[in-house]
Image (tube, coloured by chain):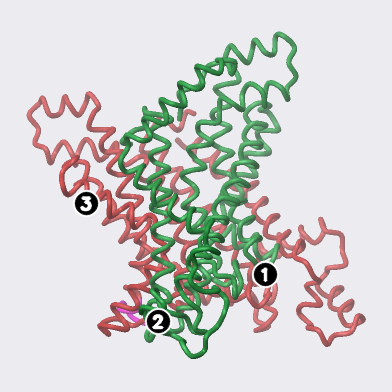
Chain colours: A green, B red
Amino acid sequence: MGGVDENKAPSAGAPAARSQIRAIWRRLLRNRMAVMGGCVVLFFVVVAVFAPLIAPYDPNKPNFMARLKGPMSDHWLGTDTLGRDMLSRIMYGSRYSLLAGIVSVTIAAFVGTLLGLLSGYYGGWVDMTIMRIMDMLLAFPGILLAIAIISVLGRGLFNAMVSVGLYSVPSFARVVRSRVLSLREQEFVEAARAIGDSDGRILFGHILPNIMTPVIIMSTMRLGTTILAAASLSFLGLGAQPPMPEWGAILSGGRDVLRVAPHIAAFPGLAILMTVVGFNLLGDGVRDALDPKLKDK
Amino acid sequence: MLRFIGKRILWMIPLLFGVTLMVFLILHLTPGDPAALILGDAADQQTIEMLRHEMGLDRPLPVQYLDFVWKAVRGDLGTSIHSKRPVVSELRSRLPATLELACTALTLAVMIGITVGIVSAVKRYSAFDHAMMLTTLVFASMPSFWLGLILMLVFSVQLGWLPAVGRGGFVHLILPAVTLAATPAALIARLTRSSMLDVVEEDYIRTAHAKGLSEEVVIWRHALKNAMIPIITVIGIQFGGMMGGSVVIESVFAWPGVGKLMVDSILTKNYPVVQGGLLMMAVIVSLINLAVDVTYGLLDPRIRYE
């Protein structure tokens, strides 16, 4: 992965940076699929932010007179086993599911970038130790590592976010390390070293701005995956706990009544699917806009 | 080549040590005393202390770790808190179900993924290509547990064609295997397409065309062999991912595998089983990764010399 601003000293100047951002933005807007993905994401973000204003009912208020109702005029997406309005629960659920994705990716990007920077810059035993730990983490495939971490931290949505974040760390660390390895031999890094800049300044002042492109690309592309993983944990009963209307948890509540009320499992799943498709399309678009060489791969 | 394989096998030793350390720490970092958990709330402090001593929990942590590794090497992963059976026996009775599910799903995913990927690449920008790319995007973004429930609703509840839960004959395997295969098949299809597109632009493919070879021969004999290198890596990663993904799918379909056992064990705080299950899964995945690396080295000589 290479970015448009790579291999340049970070002192390119504000006007140049602004015109670069405009060019990236134009490329992103020209990509119809990315715009579509962005609109879907924006829709769910708006729903999440304004849920208290637009949700027709209290998402946790039971109504035993209206249990397991299918979609109807009073309840557009029906009601659940306790008579709670599904539309309101899904609207509020977007808050938890989007938050789960964003927090997890932030943890992964922060820890992974830091470890990748240290590993690539210092090399030697630091690199060896960090990368071998990453290899060990990768021995626990997919959601299994998140489950292992949950078994230590305990159940709950926040712990699910942390565990999903930590399981994504190796991917970030590896990508950042490989970029740092090529950057540390560049002239602007050698020049910074020659004028006596400290390691901290070189790492965070010179190298970090130049690896932000792959980090942004990975972050956008991983958002969908982390939302899915957090929903999976909630579905298994390890993430969000009742009555929290997180999408995976709502869906899990629909399993036992699949025969009589399939809408309880169907709608939250559809919401997850749409959000993840949105993030994946947007992620592909961001990647193509920031790094046109990768387009169509 | 032998040197490459030897180095890769040697690396397994520290890797497995690290994996055992991580799994060991899970039980010891978990809040609460394992002995108190086993005995329950009614136990007095003296009984808890006696069990702690019996389990060796009063010894220094490094000694406990070495003891854990030594016992694990001999096939002793402790005792299940609830069933009081050896953890190894519990895992052994569940492993065939998980492997059956994962292997069937992998076969499905590889067959569908590679076929769709090749056809999409050959018919680049056609209606089929666009439809397949959209379909694979949807399947790659779909929550597998949701797909499982939808398939269950249609094929078991509505049509009554297939059993909804449990393990039995081949018919029981269809829904969970298709569900587990869906996302990997989509990812393999996308990668096969992109890998094939990379390869067909190479000079030797142009040469093959120029020699007058038929499209089939060029695609199957020349392009696919080289396009397979990244695909094999992804297949390996996907198989590992399936072992992890089986945790979710086994819970959806009440499939009596290791994954369901682990989720049930976390929910009931049966930590020795969680620990044993994690260790077993990690060892299996590490062995799969080893096999993938060796295959990778065999297919592409450049990798051996890196």
Left or right: A19, with A32 as reference point: right
Foreground residue among A175 and A277:
A277
Same chain shared by disc 3 and disc 2: no
* Residue B169 located within the stretch drawn in magenta: yes
Q: Nearer the viewer, mark 1 or mark 3?
A: 3
Give the chain of mark 3: B
Give the chain of mark 2: A
Residue corresponding to mark 2: A258
Q: Amino acid at mark 3?
A: Ala
Q: Is residue B262 visible?
A: no
Q: Does B272 sit above or below residue A15?
A: below
Whether pointer 3 and pointer 2 mark residues with C-beta atoms closer than 8 Å, the reply is no
Same chain shared by disc 1 and disc 2: no
Foreground residue among B4 and A2:
A2
| Range of residues picked out in magenta | B168-172
Give the chain of mark 1: B
Left or right: B146, with A63 as reference point: left
Circle 1 — which element? loop
Marks 3/2: CA–CA distance: 30 Å
* Residue B269 located within the stretch drawn in magenta: no
